[in-house]
Image: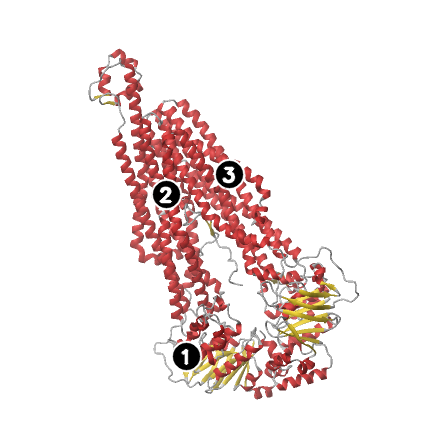
Amino acid sequence: MSDERPPTPRPVNLGMGRGPGSGRGGIAFGTERAKNFKGTMKLLFKYLRPYWARLAIVFVFAIISTSFMIAGPKLLGDMTNDVVDGYVAQRTSAQVFSKLPLGTKLPANITGEQLLTRLPTNELQKIPAAEKSAISQVNFNNGHARFNFHSISDLAILLVIIYLVSAGFSYAQSWLMTDMVQQLTYRLRHDIAHKIDHLPLKYFDSLPYGEILSRVTNDVDTVGQNLNQSLTQIITSVVMIIGVIGMMFTISWKLALVALTMIPISLGLSTLIIKRSQGYFMGQQDSLGELNGHVEEMFSGHVVMRAFNGEERSIGIFRELNEKLYGNAFRSQFLSGLLMPITQFVGNLGFVGVAVGGGWLAVQGSVSIGGIQAFLLYINLLNQPITQAANVANVLQLAAAAAERVFDFLGEEEESPDPAKAKIIDGVKGIVDFDHVKFGYLADKTIINDFTAKIKPGQRVAIVGPTGAGKTTMVNLLMRFYDVDDGSIKIDGIDTRDMKRAEVRKIFGMVLQDTWLFNGSVKDNIAYGKDNATMEEIVAAAKAAHADGFIRALPGSYEMVLDEEAGNLAQGEKQLITIARAMLADPPMLILDEATSSVDTRTEVLIQSAMERLMKGRTSFVIAHRLSTIRNADLILVMRDGNIVEHGTHNKLLKENGFYASLYNSQFTEAIDYMQGA
Amino acid sequence: MRKLAHYFIPYLLPLVLLLGLVYGQTWTTLALPNYMATIIDNGVVARSTRVIYHTGLLMILVALLGGVFMVCVSYVATRIATSYTKRIREAVFTKVERFSLVEFNSFSSASLITRSTNDVQQIQQVLVMLLRLAFLGPFMAVGAIIKAYHLAPSMTWIMAVAIASLLLVVISLFTIVLPRFQKVQKLVDRLNLVTREFLTGIRVIRAFDRQKLEEDKFNDVNKDLRTINTFVNRLLAAMQPSMMLIMNGVSVLIVWVGAHEVSSGRLQIGGMLAFVQYAAYGIMAFLLISIIFVFAPRAMVSAERIGKVLDTKPAVADPLVSNKSITSERGIVSFKDVTFTYAGADRPVLEHVTFQALPGETTAFVGSTGSGKSTLINLIPRFYDVSEGQVLIDGVDVRDMTQADLHRKIGYVPQKAVLFSGTIGSNITYGAPNATPFELEHSASVAQATEFINLLDSKMESPISQGGINISGGQKQRLSIARALAYKPEIYIFDDSFSALDFATDAKLRKALEKETVDKTVLIVAQRISTIMHADNTIVIDNGRIVGQGRHDELLKTCKIYQEIAHSQLSEKELDASVGTFETQGSGAAI
């Protein structure tokens, strides 16, 4: 069930992210804000510290690439001006020749200036001033004026080189950044896995594991992606905007003023849209959440809904929620979808402004046609960084919110370290002493109060009580998953807190009802508890656990790979494998859970026999469900609401006529079965 | 899939409108460079400010008109996409609400949830994007090429070069990257799996002191993921620089070639500049088109998954003409030679099952896991339909009744108590919204829920969160029983529904139930013999067949399987005592 549960709606990167066509720049619509933005960023930069040199190179490369990119349009404008000059010269010389008597030859290497001085004054007066200045600039080499293709080709080659360099640095920069981000996400994940190892069990018991899971995958990805986007964008956008504006002013400050009016318009509109659609986006996520909640609820309770004729009502509620979602979805999608058209529209207005204003200025002679062209290209270059600048705060917020969750996890308090001079027990005898044990999961709620008992080697302790009475508490304390608040638990006279946790745990074999098998072969699962187990040992353990029979019937036998959650084995078979695992590990003491729910009767018999064999000669703690186990136990711990309410042997407890007696006397097993039920 | 297309029919007209608007948008965008050419050639070069002002005015009008088109395109595209998704969402949900367990099993409820939430949402996202961009791409591409051709036919080859080099980059990147995306996804799944194992098995891992092993396992995947992600992202990083290089390179090429064209009089300066713009538009257009190929497959997968749901015909359907019972008796359940096989299974779960359950009696079903007893119970409310034979209620085949009528007769208490978000009261009266406050209180009290309800701050009005996670399993079960009681059915079905109750509550509950159900038909499924020791009639099921029928003491003597089950659960002494107890208690019909 939990496998395919749709993930809770998270902020979606509606832009194309790292995908193709990211030229437009992804727009991140997030609804999350980090609680402590500054602190999180500080931590994040601490993580980036090993890469400072690389980061500096990335910035330098980004600046180089952007600068070269900025140089392009101006040079292309110069190239265009050459074409314009050539065109004008060609036209002017054609006009001059058309006015000269046919067959006139001009002297070699005569310039327009010289030509004008040689003209008779009455002719000279006929020529308008504008034409005169045009003629004065023409170079009549050996006759008709020509294009200066040399200069044009040189500029073309220069431009190609510049663009190649720009692309090269841009790619190198992205490459370095990508690698760095991948290493960062790797390290974050690595640290999370390491952290999991060192957190107390208390932490895992208080948090659904899906939450931690989503930190490992989603949050780390979000940090990486948004960081990749924002860090380079900040630098390139700033350089681009400053550089382009500077270039515009060197070409023509008047035209620059015309072109730059689009910046505040574009920036203002983008910010407005992003801000407004944030709200709508949140609305969409909320109503989507509500609707998904209803769907989930109805589908998982389908049978009950059908049985009580709830279809019409359910569909009615759905229609309402769907209508609400539709309204919110439309508004948020429409508004966020406006961003691109609006920037394009403002870009078009800029285009018009430059074409008209530039045309007018060109007629005045204060700007060249190449200058106009450069401006048109510069406007294109500006469009993207402006949208990005409006959005970069958002991207950073998304990264910070995700990073904060990751860092919160990494900052959780760890288990107390093992004692430096840990004691080791050689040849465990199996004496367990509970010495005035006090324990509570919550500081203000003690559930085990001053419990004292001594268990001799080979004895069997039955833990009895209704569901939820806290029977696993004993497991938690014995295995040191939790530490006692007061008093002590001693094994062979040694306080378990004076030992390494791993050493304590090695003493116990644990077979719980909640079987845990991993995605690997049957063989590896059995061998989990023992290093370098041989195949013979594995088979022997399986045989002792009555598991050999069914394992050999599996496709691939011991090599069969268990699915995720071991879905390809029956519950009873899984239990047998965990028994075999404990069998192979051969621990001096045992912790068992007898519960065999959802196991058919025949397998149940096998499991019981295997457990019996496993317990032989070992001090065992059994979460007991069978009367025979309980009656024959050397010590019974009766638990209720987390407390050990009674303890003693069967006969002693019956005589006391307390909770246990009432449990036992009420309709035989029924009571206990009920209370411990599946 | 055809169904999905069918739902799009009402949007065909808006789609035509959208196409018109996109055409308008394309036209206005592509008109601007031409005007600019006019300004330069007839205004600047010819030194005519009049032409500049005149053309400038036209340009502003066209740009404004273009803005209007763009907003309209966005509006219509979003309307179509969100409204269509709304329809699909409702269609899927309504469809699934009528599904029987056959369909729920074949899809799994988790998958159905994903299909009606995530998959539909995916379609909306992609549809919005495609409608806004996809049409623009082809229009713009064709338009830009035509415009360029008109300006300088001899230079159209540059457009071809530009588009070809663009496609070369895009296609070669994608052919390398796309298959690796799947690998990335697989590794992400694997990372999830390893982490989940790490977390769910934390006790076992620590018990065996295997943290290091698990950490290494995790880091192996982590490393693999880093390697492939680095590779893929390095390649993708080439995308933007090469796009820019192509754009800029083409501009240079146009000016260089254009210089020669201008010199030979075939092209004017303004035309050359306009050509640069058209080439940029052409490249952009093909980029947009290539985006379709990235996003469309994602939507296709979702569309297919949704299509499968919509195309499924529920296995259980209402009859055309419903039949009402003619007998005066109410609540007689009879199975006549019923055989049931799950879809796709080669062996039936139930074979030739025949029995009758009468009002005022408790009929119990017992058998090991997988014996078919839950399946049998599920045939009564038609969660499944029989493969052969008949299930009759008061003499009428359940398939001849409407499901609403049938369900009205049955008070069903499932194995796993399911509550819906709302209040305690709204859950109890879920089946009977018009129940009086007295009936509500009464049901709660019979189900032994009054005590804990009264301890809550808002009593009956106390909120139940989704899935009822804010109350305990035992409390859930009691509310689930109260819900069935408030429904006032003729037939009660308890599918192993007392498991989470503690002993004292259980005893009280069953005593109260006994009075409440005195003239009703009670069917009860149980794992444990002790639960059903006092039933009027116990039916023992093994491997889908009835292997014994009778009272506890009779079955102990006659039925081998019953003996086996009894012996595995009770000791000799207890068995003897149970028969004794039973006899001394006489025919007390305890549940």
Q: Is residue A243 left or right of residue B429?
A: left
Quadrant hosting residue B149: top left
Q: Disc 3 residue type? A: Val
- Which mark is on residue B243? 2
Tell me which numbered mark, 3 or 2, is placed earlier along the sequence: 3
Q: In front: mark 1 or mark 3?
A: 1
Residue A221 position by quadrant: bottom left
Q: Are marks 1 and 2 in contact (CB under 8 Å)?
A: no
Query: Do discs 1 and 2 belong to a common subunit?
Result: no
Residue at image mark 3:
B71
Binning the other alpha carbons within 10 Å of mark 3 as few (below 14), some (14 to 19) or many (20 upward) gives: many
| Chain for numbered disc 2 | B
Q: Are marks 1 and 3 on the same chain?
A: no
Report the quarter where the N terminus of chain A lies.
Answer: bottom right
* Element class at badge 3: helix
Alpha-carbon neighbours of circle 2 within 10 Å: few (<14), some, or many (≥20)? many
Identity of the amino acid at label 2? Met
Q: Evaluate whether residue B483 shows in this view.
A: no
Q: Amino acid at mark 1?
A: Glu
Labelled disc at residue A537: 1
- The CA span between labels 1 and 3 is 74 Å
Q: Give whichever of A418, A172 is nearer the camera.
A: A172
- SS state under label 1: helix
